[in-house]
Amino acid sequence: MTEKVEGPIRVLLADPSEFTLIGMRQVLQREPGIEVIGTATDGDQLLARTTELEPDVVITEVDLPRLSGDKAAQRMRRELPSVQVVILTSRDEEQLLFDAIRAGAAAYLKKDCPPEELVDAVRRVHAGEFLINERVFARPAVASRVLAEFRRPASCRP
């Protein structure tokens, strides 16, 4: 992996909807210090583009064709641990939040979040923060599942 040079936060976007990709690109591109370096419309393409472009942050819809966003995130975190992942979804379900945590995502946002929340998330996860913690603490059922998961021996985890 090549060494990253100081400069703009390099962001890769993944969503099956071209319309959504255009909107996210427009929101992020107008922000100083953020550069959208590419897009993907399915999970396989996301993995290939991540390897090829080596972004700092990936924003991915969880419901991607071929390979879901959370499964792609899990592979990215194993193969390219320096890439920070933001899971984006229109469905706010505890199971999706739990899967995002298991995948190693740094943030979990709803698609209807304000644009400034998305920008803030990109900047914060790039700085090393884990915003997903804020969502977990707000949902006791998810927090309990996370604690139970990590109490199990590693050999018993999926």
Image (cartoon, rainbow, N blue to C red):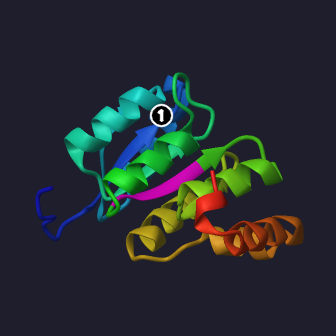
Question: In the rendered structure, does residue 95 fall within the stretch colored magenta?
Answer: no
* Range of residues picked out in magenta: 83-87
Q: In which quarter of the image is residue 2?
A: bottom left
Indicate left or right for 13 with 86 as reference: left
Could you tell whether 3 is left or right of 77 in the image?
left
On the rendered structure, is 63 left or right of 55? right
Nearer-the-camera pick, 115 or 8: 8
Q: Which residue is drawn at 52% across and 55% down?
A: 86
Point out residue 115 in the picture as x, y percentages from the top left corner: 57, 55
Q: Residue at x 71, y 69 (%)?
A: 152
> Which amino acid type corresponds to the residue marked 1 in the rendered image?
Leu
Q: Is residue 108 visible?
A: no
Q: Nearer the viewer, residue 139 or 18?
A: 139
Q: Which of 88 and 30 is in front in this view?
A: 88
Which residue is under mark 1?
Answer: 21
Residue at coordinates 59% horizontally, 71% vertically from top-left? 131
The picture places residue 42, in percent across and down from the top left corner, at 47, 26
Asked if residue 90 shows in the view, the reply is yes
Helix, strand or loop for disc 1: helix
Left or right: 8 in relation to 103? left
Question: Residue 6 appears at what percent x and percent y?
Answer: 16, 71
Compared to residue 52, the image places residue 87 above or below, namely below
Q: Residue at position x 54%, y 33% from top?
A: 20
